[in-house]
Amino acid sequence: MDAIACTKDGTPFTAALVDALAKPPHVGLVDEAGAALLARWVAAGAPSTRGGVHPTSFADPRSPSGHGAFLRARAYRPMTDAGDRDACATCHDGAGAGPSRTTTTAPGATSCATCHDEPGGAFACTTCHGARGRAFPPRDPCFHPDARRSDAHAAHAAPSASRSVPIDCGACHPSPAFGSLTAPHVDGVLSVWLDPGAAGLRSTWDERTKTCTGTCHARGGARPTPSWTDGTKATCNDCHASPPPAHYGGACTSCHREADATGTALVMPRLHVNGRVDLGDGSGACGACHGRGADPWPETGAHAAHASPRASRPVPCETCHEVPSANAHPVGRGGAVVRFAGLATSGARRAIWDPGTRSCAGTYCHEHAGGSATAPRWEDGPAAVASCGSCHASPPRLPHVQDTRCGSAGCHEALDVKKVHVDGKVDRLGP
């Protein structure tokens, strides 16, 4: 008599077995002697046919007298203590990977792995906390139809639109070692124990209001203390402002590859909520935010003409911008801060930047006697200074040799133009 069935309230429903054998398609499945034996068994209250060790409802996880309720009442000692008088492994194989496992079982005793067939067997987290493949609440609705649904658990413990890697259970709860079902894990109290390393040194949990403070959510946003029971999904502005105060005002995608351009959604949340600020691909190199690959500058305007010119050495970034430190990056609302120094001011030049016309003037690099483009606009790009006569006359005025054949004038032909051009001084050969 291995068949077990239950009603919604968990009570045995064995009498229906006798009725079923008298109706198609079950007629004839059991001979007359077997049917009589079954009827006597049901009339006797369906006692166990294997020694009477457990009641009939012991295998039903929905029953108040089921093995789940029995183990909870005993703080799971029959599973973890081989010396316990009711140790599961005394009779059953697959009781778990804990100290109660034995190599011998009672003849005919059902293996725990018959139902608990996930990795870890009966000790798998899904046995108590969730359902197959989900080790967090709500509990399996098949066996626990009244279990409370908890969307907040899924938002933390499962991959989501804001994070591709789940948050470890130990960030909020005491996390036991595998196979160790000891207090405070099985003391019947729902313990919230925020890990300072994951949630922050000053993180706290308010049991009365079901809110946490000083944690992953308190980053200057509109909802720094979310309620566990609220159920409202978090937005980009709830934990931190988007963009944060005094932050660069351009598109989020300029620096953060996981955000969309408007800062309202994440497209690849691999680095989000990981305890640090990651720019670009997280490498920390300038090219992670400003360029692509090995080019650490934006692909806009005349950047390439300065950072990788064809006729001179690259212009150092600090010539036009203040170089950031590890903790500070000087940026303005909607664009970078231009501050000329070094080569741009060589020879006591008073270089200036006009943000209205987006042009520079008075720089050593472009303003030499007789040049035709002494105040180039940023958007014009390399075309604005493509010719030698753009920055200085070609040839320069007297006393320079009035010959446009620079390579044959006996002065510049042996020089590596790319190394010495636009370097702050005049290089020549000869007398």
Image (spheres, rainbow, N blue to C red):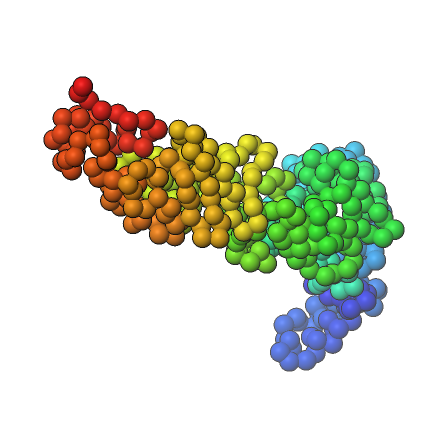
Q: Position of residue 285 (x, y in %)?
A: 47, 36
259, above or below 419, in the image: below
In the orientation shown, which residue stands out farthest toward the top? 431
Q: Nearer the viewer, residue 336 or 204?
A: 336
Residue lying at the far right in this picture: please name it: 208
Please name the residue shown 50% across and 34% down the image: 323
Query: 209 or 101, which lies in front?
Result: 209
Give how far across and how far down residue 253 sits, in percent: 50, 52
Q: Residue at x 84, y 47 (%)?
A: 206
Give above or below for 289 relative to 158.
above
Residue 112 is situated, as x and y percent measured from the top left of the image, at 67, 48
- The N terminus appears in which quarter of the rendering? bottom right
Residue furthest toward the front?
398
Q: Is residue 316 left or right of residue 68?
A: left
Query: Residue reaching furthest left?
Result: 408
Q: Residue at x 29, y 42 (%)?
A: 371
Q: Position of residue 255 (x, y in %)?
A: 51, 46
User: Eyeballing the image, is 80 above or below 269?
Assistant: above
- Residue 319, image quadrant: top left
The image quadrant that residue 345 belongs to is: top left
Q: Could you say which is closer to the camera, residue 61 or residue 253?
A: 253
The answer to whether residue 288 is visible is no
- Residue 28 appears anywhere in the view: yes
Q: Nearer the viewer, residue 406 or 48?
A: 406
Q: How many marks?
A: 0
The residue positioned 81% from the left and 38% from the top of the image is 183
Q: Quadrant of the C terminus?
A: top left
